[in-house]
Image (spheres, rainbow, N blue to C red):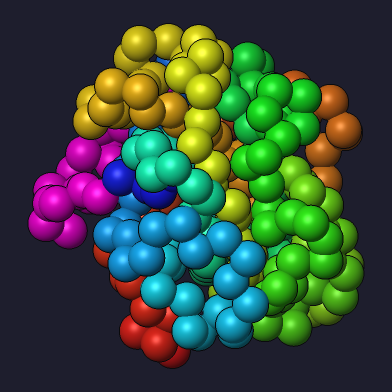
Amino acid sequence: MYLLPKKTSFLTSFLALAVAVFTAYYARAGVIVQYAADTDIANNDDFTGPFNSFVNYVSFLNFAGFEHDYVWAVQPSGGTTEYAFNISANFSTVPAEAIYLELGFGVGENFVSAASVFSDLDFDAPLPGIPAPSSDKVWATVNHQAHRIQYSDGLADDVIYGIAEFSIDVPDLPVSVNDFYTSSQLPANLPAGGGVFTLRTRIGLAIPEPSGAALSVLALASITMMIGLRKATKLR
């Protein structure tokens, strides 16, 4: 399965995102519905090159201190497509204590880990994935599991920006996973037979308890997302 493209200008994407953020904030669900960048090569599972040579690449920036649920639309492809993700976090308001990532389905209090629903959606399993999750020397410890990644033990209190990179294997998803979402939470361009999944991020805060059931909180205008960057070299 590969992530669906969204053909819009940056301004249009930003305004749409602002509306989604505003709605999510007042619904207290912490949901941002967003579509993916263009996919150069589908079904490229088990890619073993470095992050800067990935052709399927998604990058976004957000301000730390909140938990976010990102909902991604996907298109069946008859296989598994591997993506490199890059999070650039702004720590100007909170210490760079930790980054917590989890794959699953549903949002807010209804979020359920992929491990208990459809485990083929993972952070580049079997472990250790190649390339392994990495950071720009901001965090001393990276705990890489199939459906969770924890960056912790921040090395400095005065960090303003921190970058974390990781891979996600996106398989064909059963349409039953869409039942974890309300109709308003499903992307508008979800095709017949397609599915969605959630990337939960908790940035700049202590790592949550394993239950992962805490209510997501989102501040309006706290995040800017850039998509459509297909090669990591554009970020360097």
* Residue nearer the viewer, 215 or 182: 182
Residue, x 58% and y 71% (percent of image)? 47
Residue 172 appears in the picture as rendered: yes
Q: Please provide percent x and percent y for residue 12.
A: 13, 48
Residue 46 horizontal side relative to residue 63, left or right: right
Q: Please provide percent x and percent y for residue 11.
A: 14, 55
Residue, x 59% and y 26% (percent of image)? 105
Q: Quarter of the image for the C terminus: give it.
A: bottom left
* Residue nearer the viewer, 31 or 64: 31
Q: Is residue 94 above or below residue 148?
A: below
Residue 16 horizontal side relative to residue 45, left or right: left
Residue, x 18% and y 43% (percent of image)? 15
Q: Which residues are magenta?
A: 5-24
Q: Is residue 15 magenta?
A: yes
Q: Quarter of the image for the N terminus: give it.
A: top left
Q: Is residue 36 above or below residue 25?
A: below
Q: Please provide percent x and percent y for residue 29.
A: 51, 21
